[in-house]
């Protein structure tokens, strides 16, 4: 009930006009005092709402909410040019703990390959190594897709690199901005983080398995939320001459990710390596690889067909296969 109340309040306030507390209470069957408590909770997730006696509640600026029907209509339109696949199931949530967790809880029987979960807000969004993914309401993209790995978990190596290429494809198509890629799972723009990828797996190495691909893209970061991020970041709107349309970009991401997944399923990562290297933010630069307290210095020589980082150390190139590692420029 609480979630339904909050979702009703958000949709009522989204146009940016005053809505009286009495009217909201009547629509929801609750008191004006209860409405005020729910409004206070919405302030806590980053919505800028103010009240004026005699007028009611109003958002400081209108919200452009994600619309499931619009996203699906865009997917249907794009499918006319590519009849290989059916339109995936798409869910849009106003409030959720984590889009990845939502899909992972439904493995394996409640999902179909390509199924997508989008959210306006995540209360427990996560990045790699359990880090918090700051998820302000209604201004970014939080998207997760389920995929079936017929060849087992061994087929998952390289998925994060392939996903980063899909994000690059979608952003380029949507607004003409070219991003850079950082092994193993980040998307950069002008040297700082724009988007992150979180791949989660369930199954056995050599048996059909399950995968959830999570993508978080900074589109228009509210200043207050930005202060909570521990690393340097940027958002897409700051670099785009056109206004970012979240519904259109979400549909583009879904299409690009599915196209990349089908190509990856057929031929693996090797045919995509030239594209990856053309956008590699660290290629041929001195870097340091941090694993716990251990720091390894070397030169980034790109990635191989299994998705491993190629690190040159003392004139020898060694593959680094992910894990709990962090790659940074060696200044």
Image: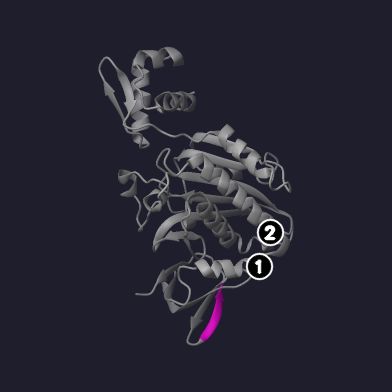
Callouts 1 and 2 close, C-beta under 8 Å? yes
| SS at mark 2 in the image | helix
Does 309 sit above or below residue 260?
below
Relative depth, front residue between 72 and 325? 72
Q: Residues within 10 Å of mark 1 (few under 14, many from 20)?
A: few
Residue 202 is inside the magenta segment: no
The residue that label 1 is drawn on is 271
Q: Is-magenta flag for residue 318?
A: yes
Secondary structure mainly formed by the magenta segment: strand
**In what element is the residue under mark 1?**
helix
Counting every numbered tag in the picture gives 2
Determine whether, in the image, residue 283 is placed left or right of residue 158: left
* 274 displayed left or right of 221: right
- Read off the magenta span: 316-320
Q: Nearer the viewer, residue 242 or 152?
A: 242
Q: Position of residue 303 (x, y in %)?
A: 56, 72
Quadrant of residue 10 within the rendered picture: top left
Visible residue check, residue 293 = no
Q: In percent of the image, x 47 and y 53: which residue is there?
A: 127
Percent x, y of residue 77: 64, 40
The residue carrying mark 2 is: 263
201 or 119: nearer the viewer: 119
Q: Residue at x 40, y 47 (%)?
A: 134
Q: Is residue 16 above or below residue 113?
A: above
Q: Residue at x 34, y 16 (%)?
A: 20
Give the residue displayed 67% in from the left and 60% down from the top: 264
């Amino acid at each position: 009930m609480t979630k339904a109340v909050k979702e009703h309040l958000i949709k009522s306030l989204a146009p940016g006009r005053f809505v009286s507390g009495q009217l909201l209470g009547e629509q929801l069957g609750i008191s004006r005092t209860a409405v005020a408590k729910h409004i206070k909770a919405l302030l806590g997730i980053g919505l800028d709402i103010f009240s004026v006696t005699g007028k009611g509640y109003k958002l400081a600026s209108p919200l452009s909410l994600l619309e499931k029907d619009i996203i699906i209509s865009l997917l249907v339109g794009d499918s006319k040019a590519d009849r290989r696949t059916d339109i995936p199931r798409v869910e849009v949530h106003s409030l959720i703990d984590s889009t990845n967790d939502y899909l992972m809880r439904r493995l394996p029987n409640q999902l179909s390959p390509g199924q997508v979960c989008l959210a306006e807000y995540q209360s427990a969004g996560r990045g790699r190594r359990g880090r918090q993914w700051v998820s302000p309401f209604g201004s970014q993209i939080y998207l997760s897709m389920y995929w079936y790995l017929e060849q087992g978990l061994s087929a998952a190596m390289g998925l994060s690199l392939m996903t980063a290429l899909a994000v690059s494809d979608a952003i380029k198509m949507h607004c003409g901005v070219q991003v850079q890629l950082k092994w193993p799972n980040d998307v950069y723009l002008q040297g700082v983080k724009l988007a992150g990828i979180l791949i989660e797996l369930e199954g056995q190495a050599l048996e059909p398995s399950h995968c959830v691909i999570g993508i978080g893209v900074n589109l228009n970061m509210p200043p207050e939320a930005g202060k909570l991020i521990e690393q340097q970041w940027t958002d897409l709107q700051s670099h785009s001459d056109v206004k970012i349309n979240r519904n259109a970009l979400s549909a583009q991401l879904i299409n690009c990710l599915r196209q990349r997944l089908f190509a990856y399923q057929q031929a693996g990562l090797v045919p995509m390596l030239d594209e990856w290297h053309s956008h590699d933010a660290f290629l041929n630069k001195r870097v340091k690889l941090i694993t716990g307290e251990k720091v390894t210095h070397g030169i980034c020589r790109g990635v191989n067909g299994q998705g491993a980082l190629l690190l040159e150390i003392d004139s020898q190139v060694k593959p680094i296969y992910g894990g709990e590692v962090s790659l940074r420029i060696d200044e």
